[in-house]
Amino acid sequence: MTYLDLDFVRPKFPALATDWALFDNAGGSVPLGGVIDRIHDYMSTCMVQVDGSYPQSLEATARIQAGHRAAEQLFGAGENEVALGSSSTVLMRTVSSALRPLWNDGDEVIVTDLDHETNIGPWRNLEATGITLREWRFNEETMRLELEDLEPLLNERTRLVAFTHCSNIVGQMRDDARRIVDRVHAAGALVAMDGVAYTPHARADVKALDVDLYVASIYKVFGPHISALYGRHELLARAASQNHFFIGDDEVPYKLEPGNVTHELAASLPAVIEYLEDLDRHHGGAGTIEGAYERIGAHETEIVRPLLTFLHEHPRAKIIGSPVAATGTRAPTVAFTVDGMKASEIPARLDERKVAVRWGHFYAHRLITRLGLHDQDGVVRASMAHYNSPEEVHRLVNELDAVL
């Protein structure tokens, strides 16, 4: 049973008009046709400099501002609380540099060994500037970051804890994220959360989370290759400008967007919000982002189940993470290894059958190191989006059965 009308969904994504079954969506979803149309229209009609007084410039400025508003809607953020940038990594590097002047030498930042490097490397780089780094290590039995393991790391010098809302390898979605945020805040520290692997599958409401920083890649949420960083406004207002010297600290979020945003990509972002609202409305909802994500989560839970079952029952396969499909706690991002085979062997065999998966460490390099999987070329990852069909998943399972 599925919960989405794929006859409505799939035509919205032109790249799905192919005989390939695409299961590399955690690396980047295919874009909406509405996104493509908006980029084309922007570049065709108002690809001019912004902030001018003539009509084309006024229109360009308005469309880019609408892109910022769309990103804020996606997060449930307030106005001017979201900066846009070329990637989540760039945005985290920018904001880490912006926050460093607020801290003293010897202050501490806690990172994990589970996350994508986006939410590790930028904070680790501060060690060279006098910040002390501590590591919150995941539990290898549960494949989770356990709060009990964070407790001994927190002290009066902790300034920030960085962790993921959903692992891009393990696929665990932190339904207890608010509990972690509350504990960190009680210790007097900030929280920087990586939502890149979460936001394609569930609503990230930054106000409900009470998080201080939250980053997501819009090109994994059906948009163009651009990313977004939420920051609590009072925090961003205190952070040091990373733009030109004449861009003041009060110019939020522009002071965190050096060189400005990519105009045509920012201008396309309202198409993502329109699609989510239309998706909910088409399925009988009120046309809300929350409603769309509820339907997406239910659909993805159903379609990922046959793959998890197959891998769990296969005598040589091992899933990294839970084998149980569960809305809100298990993303349809499935990483696995196969005894007697390197991870790099499997995608090549599936390519011959026009089924697209990937292998590697997926920038969760420290996680793969802990698991001792580099010699096996990391893991195989098959990742789904809500536009994938049950038929495609059964095809993936059948082809895996043939090549393993």
Image (tube, rainbow, N blue to C red):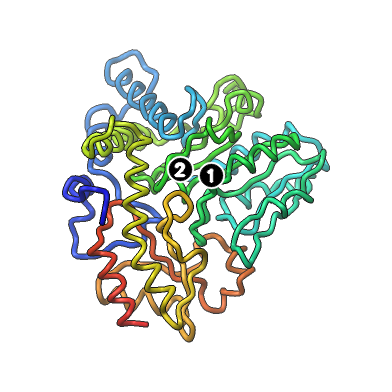
Disc 2, SS: loop
Answer few, some or many: residues within 10 Å of disc 1's Cα (few below 14, many 20 plus, some between 14 and 19): some
On screen, residue 255 above or below 5: above
| Kind of residue sitting beneath label 1 | Val
Of 395 and 159, nearer the camera is 395
Picture residue at 34% right of the left edge, 21% below the top:
62
Residue in the picture at 42% in, 77% down: 313
x and y, in percent, of residue 310 in the image: 37, 73
Residue in front for this viewpoint, 285 or 344:
285
Q: In terms of image quadrants, where is residue 281?
A: top left
Q: Is residue 383 left or right of residue 238?
A: left
Which amino acid, mark 2? Answer: Ser
- How far, Cα to Cα, is label 2 from label 1? 7 Å
Q: Which residue is mark 1?
A: 90
Residue picked out by circle 2:
86
**315 above or below 212?**
below
Quarter of the figure that contains the C terminus:
bottom left
**Dots 2 and 1: beta carbons under 8 Å?**
yes
Asked if residue 10 lies left or right of residue 175, the reply is left
Residue 33 quadrant: top left
In what quadrant of the picture does the N terminus appear?
Answer: bottom left
Instruction: Give the answer, above or below, for where 100 lies relative to 236.
Output: below
User: Along the line of sight, which residue is nearer the eye, 227 or 138?
Assistant: 138
Give the x, y percent position of residue 74. 41, 34
Percent across and percent down for residue 226 are 41, 42
Q: Secondary structure at mark 1?
A: helix
Q: Residue furthest bottom?
A: 340
Q: Can I make out residue 220 in this image? A: yes
Q: Where residue 70 sits in the image (x, y, percent)?
A: 38, 30
Task: Tell me what residue is drawn at x 46 percent, y 34 percent.
Answer: 75
In this rendering, position of residue 290 left or right of residue 183? left
Residue 264 visible here: no
